Every structure is written in structure tokens, then in C-alpha cells.
Image (cartoon, rainbow, N blue to C red):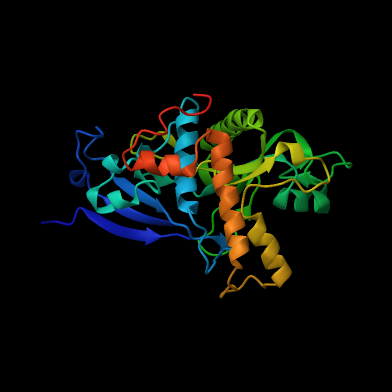
Amino acid sequence: MPQRFRYASSGKVRDIYEVDAGSRDSTRKERPHEEATLVLVATDRMSTLDVVLRDEVPNKGFVLTALTQFWMDRLQDIAPNHMIGWRGRDLPGEVAHYAGRAMLVRKLSMIPIECVVRGYLTGSAWSSYRAKGSVSGTRLPDSFRHGERLPEPIFTPAIKNRHGHDENVSIAQMRNAIGVELTEQIHRLSIELYKRAAEFASAQGVLIADTKFEFGIDHYGNLILADEVLTPDSSRFWLSETWKPGGIPYSFDREPIREWLKSFNWNGCAPPPHLPRAVVNETARRYMGIYQILTGHSIDDWIATARGADTVGSRRGA
């Protein structure tokens, strides 16, 4: 019998499996038989400075998958996405036990661009502003402080590197790399996606300081939203009531780990140090916390639904 399901590769966080059409029950999800599919399994691995840390963050993979599904569902009228299914009954039997942290998706030709949108001046945008007074060619007022809200969201692409940090590029460089028409389409969609998500999150008391999107092309030639969407790994979520320009807002991401590694004076090279259990637990609490704030459900609700219960049938704001 030919093998119809096989391990393909692993990234810093995700394990990827290739799925032949015959290994899925076609009565569950009707897709073209010739369309290749993948299963993306989000693990609890944590990386920083492009190094996978020794300690995993409990439930992290569930949060990444749950928020990706939440946002893809909410944003699909702006951009179609590659999601086919996420419940255990949607997955090939070989990975059904990963329900809650796995997605069955269409295989795409991925565009090697990180599509970053920034609504606030932080991270590498803050570093660029301090050095040059501008961010990706956009000149900003001289008086801006760290964390300042930008007049309009800024699109700041980066070229994905297989080894080492991604390289920030200008929109002109992006046009040269993938073409003018595709660049303009991605630029427009990225800003629209960010604005819609930021408006929704703001109503829940959360600011999206920045985020990154990834896109691919399907075998019909359509531009498709892919990978993870608006998760604590790909975004900075700030508690709005703690934000003010020049201050340090409370964040729902890996900040506890970043701060501890800074205090440890780690040089960013492997092997990384072991993290204190309190730091790991606080990071897990923040990841699960942002999911609950945005969706109105606990991560336990999500896991139960993915495995067959009906506890997340009504999403906040749906």
C-alpha cells in the first residue's frame, strides 16, 4: 500500500506533514482531489533570537492554532485562507490525537516575504526611527516616543531567510523581488487585515502594536492568507489600559522570557539556558490570557471543541 501520510519537516515551532488526498475522508471536506494538503502541528516549542529554547511553554501550540482559526474565520471576507479543517474529525487519523494544535491546510507556493504591519512605534521600527527618523522610508515626527501610536499603520516587509534574522526591505525592493502587482495586492490586504483586527481587539481592551502575515499562491493562482494569523508569536498584544507613549505596556507575548534572558546576559547562541519555571508559567498564562480576552472562551473550551465537544460554538462578536 503506498504511503499516503508522511512527515515532511519541522520549523522552530511547527511540525509539517504531507497528506495525499486519498488519506482523507472526502465526505468530510470536499476539495479537488489534485489539491495537495498539509497538516501543520503547532508544538509548545519557544524560540527567540532564532534559537529554539530548551523549555516548552505549556498549551502554547493550542493557543497558536486556536487564535489562527479564530482570526481566519473572522477575516475571510478580506482574504481567503488555506484552512480546510481543525477538528479531530477533519484530520487524517494518523494525527487526530493532535486535535487542538493541528490544522489541515491547502499546500501553497509560499511567498518568501514577512508582511509586517505596525500600528505603534516599537521593536525594530523604534530602532530604525531612533537611527534615521523614519521607518521603511516613512518619515515620522521628531517628537515620537517609544510606543507612540502611528498616524496610520505602516507596511514594513522583510525577506525571509532560512538561516539567521529576516532582512527588512523597502517596498521598492519587494516589488523587485515578487513584482509590482503582487506587492500592491499584499500591501493592501495586509493593511486591511490589520485594521479590521485592531478595531476588534480594541473593543476588547487590547492594542495590536504590530503583527506579521504570510501569503501563498494556490494552484489556481489566487493569493491566500496562510500560516499563523495574529498570534502572540507573530504579534505584539498590549493591554490598552496600561499603554501610554514612552511607557512599557503590559504585553501578552513572550516578553517575560525576553526580559529574563536579558537579565541572564545570554549571548543568543545555542545552547540557550534553562528558563525558571516561574518565567515559563507566566508566559503560558499570558498566551492563554490573550486567547480568552479576544474570544471570550478558555483554551480548555477550544481543546474540548477540537476533540469533539461543542463548547466553542458561539464566538465573541460573531
Describe residue 279's horizontal placement relative to residue 262 as left or right: left
Q: Residue furthest left?
A: 1
Q: Residue furthest right?
A: 143
Q: Position of residue 112 (x, y in %)?
A: 50, 50
Instruction: Point out the image quarter for the N terminus.
Output: bottom left
Q: Could one spot residue 116 in this view of the protein?
A: no
Question: Observer-nearest residue: 309 or 126?
Answer: 309
Question: Observer-nearest residue: 242 or 270?
Answer: 242
Q: Position of residue 59 (x, y in %)?
A: 48, 53
Q: How many marks?
A: 0
Q: Residue at left 58%, top 65%?
A: 277
Q: Could one spot residue 121 in this view of the protein?
A: yes
Q: Residue furthest bottom?
A: 271
Q: Position of residue 116 (x, y in %)?
A: 61, 43
Q: Residue at left 71%, top 66%?
A: 262
Q: Position of residue 177 (x, y in %)?
A: 54, 47
Image height check: is 280 above or below 218? below
Image height check: is 4 above or below 201? below
Q: Residue at left 50%, top 27%?
A: 78
Question: Observer-nearest residue: 169 or 52?
Answer: 52
Describe residue 245's horizontal placement relative to residue 14 as left or right: right
Question: Observer-nearest residue: 91 or 284?
Answer: 284
Describe residue 266's horizontal placement relative to residue 308 as left or right: right
